[in-house]
Image (tube, grey):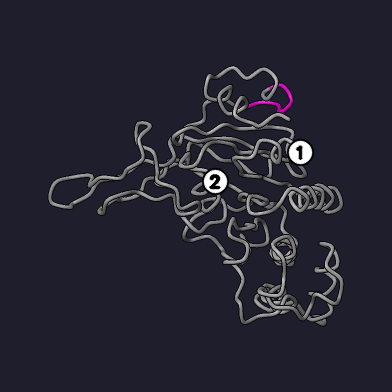
């Protein structure tokens, strides 16, 4: 049985202002290929905007799946659904033995699936130093050992020595902040790590280092990894299988190597052709 099963999920948002925004990326949601930038109905009553439509896929324990697509495709909304922070309008999401819903055990769900946020720095409390940020989930989940020592060990696992434990987010580089966020996600020993644009804000060197870190953690911890990105180089380095989202619909999925070399759908070919080549 797969660790993650997503069955025919759909999600809409009610729009009452001038535009619909993807809650993860902040990008205007596309409707029929056009970003919503005008009032959507007379009188300001708004309407429902479909962000995801009948999306389905599976991911085995220890496997890696990449979700690709342009801004507004619904990728970040999908990440929020997988983390249980949003609920689908229809369809089901099962992670291990938990069906994700408003009624499910939130702590048990957190031990199955953790989200590495797209805005890593924004997801950290600026008042907490690195070890205290990592210690938060340990405290919430009732860790019985030495919390500071365990938090420091987790920081070391992601490549941050003990000298980083007392530093605050403003004292850390972008790559270091991303490592703290990953360490925090690992604190409860999840089975699934959902990475929403894990390297989009990083320079080329740090992007490569974060990709290498995620590859190592997946192998060492037997983690299932779902990586969401518009960066095909990052996704192809992390995932064996790819799923292509366009305007909230799955247009193509398959083995990463084959899909990137011989894409079938015109939209996938467009994405592949847009990757800069030196």
Rendered image: mark on residue 217: none
Side of 122 where 91 appears, left or right: left
Number of marks drawn = 2
Q: Where is residue 257 in the image (x, y as percent from the top left)?
A: 74, 25
Q: Identify which residue is drawn at 74% across, 44% down.
A: 61
Side of 75 where 38 appears, left or right: left
Q: Does the magenta stretch include residue 256?
A: yes
Q: Give the residue furthest to the front.
A: 278
Crowd band around label 1 with a 10 angstrom C-alpha radius: few (<14), some (14–19), many (20+): some
Q: Is residue 173 magenta?
A: no
The magenta span reads 253-258
Which quadrant: the C terminus? top right
Instruction: Name the residue nearer the viewer: 243 or 275.
Output: 275
Residue picked out by circle 2: 93
Q: Position of residue 251 (x, y in %)?
A: 52, 26
Q: Looking at the image, is 245 positioned above or below residue 220? A: above
Q: Looking at the image, is 128 positioned above or below residue 182? A: below
Side of 222 where 197 appears, left or right: left
Mark positioned earlier in the residue sequence (1 or 2): 2
Would you say the residues marked 1 and 2 are in contact, meaning their CB atoms lie under 8 Å apart?
Answer: no
Residue picked out by circle 1: 237
Instruction: Name the residue nearer the viewer: 251 or 54.
Output: 251
Mark 1: secondary structure? helix
Which quadrant: the N terminus? top right
């Amino acid at each position: 049985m797969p660790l993650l099963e997503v069955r025919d999920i759909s999600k809409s948002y009610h729009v009452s202002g001038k535009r619909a925004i993807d809650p993860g990326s902040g990008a205007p949601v596309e409707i029929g290929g056009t970003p919503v930038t005008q009032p959507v109905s007379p009188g300001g009553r708004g309407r429902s905007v479909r962000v995801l439509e009948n999306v389905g896929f599976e991911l085995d324990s220890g496997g890696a799946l990449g979700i690709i697509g342009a801004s507004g495709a619904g990728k970040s909304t999908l990440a929020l659904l997988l983390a249980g922070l949003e609920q689908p309008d229809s369809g089901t999401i099962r992670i291990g033995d938990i069906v994700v819903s408003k009624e499910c055990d939130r702590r048990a769900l957190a031990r199955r699936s953790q989200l590495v946020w797209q805005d890593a720095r924004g997801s950290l409390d600026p008042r907490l130093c690195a070890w205290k940020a990592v210690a938060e989930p340990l405290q919430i989940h009732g860790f019985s050992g030495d919390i500071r020592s365990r938090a420091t060990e987790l920081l070391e696992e992601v490549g941050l020595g003990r000298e980083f434990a007392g530093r605050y987010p403003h004292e850390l580089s972008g790559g270091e902040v991303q490592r703290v966020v990953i360490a925090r996600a690992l604190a409860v020993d999840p089975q699934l790590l959902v990475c929403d644009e894990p390297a989009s804000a990083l320079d080329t060197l740090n992007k490569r280092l974060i990709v290498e870190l995620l590859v190592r953690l997946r192998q060492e911890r037997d983690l299932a990894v779902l990586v969401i990105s518009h960066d095909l180089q990052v996704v192809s380095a992390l995932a064996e299988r790819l799923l292509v989202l366009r305007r909230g619909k799955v247009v193509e999925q398959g083995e990463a190597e084959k899909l990137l070399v011989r894409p079938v759908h015109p939209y996938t070919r467009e994405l592949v052709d847009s990757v800069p080549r030196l």
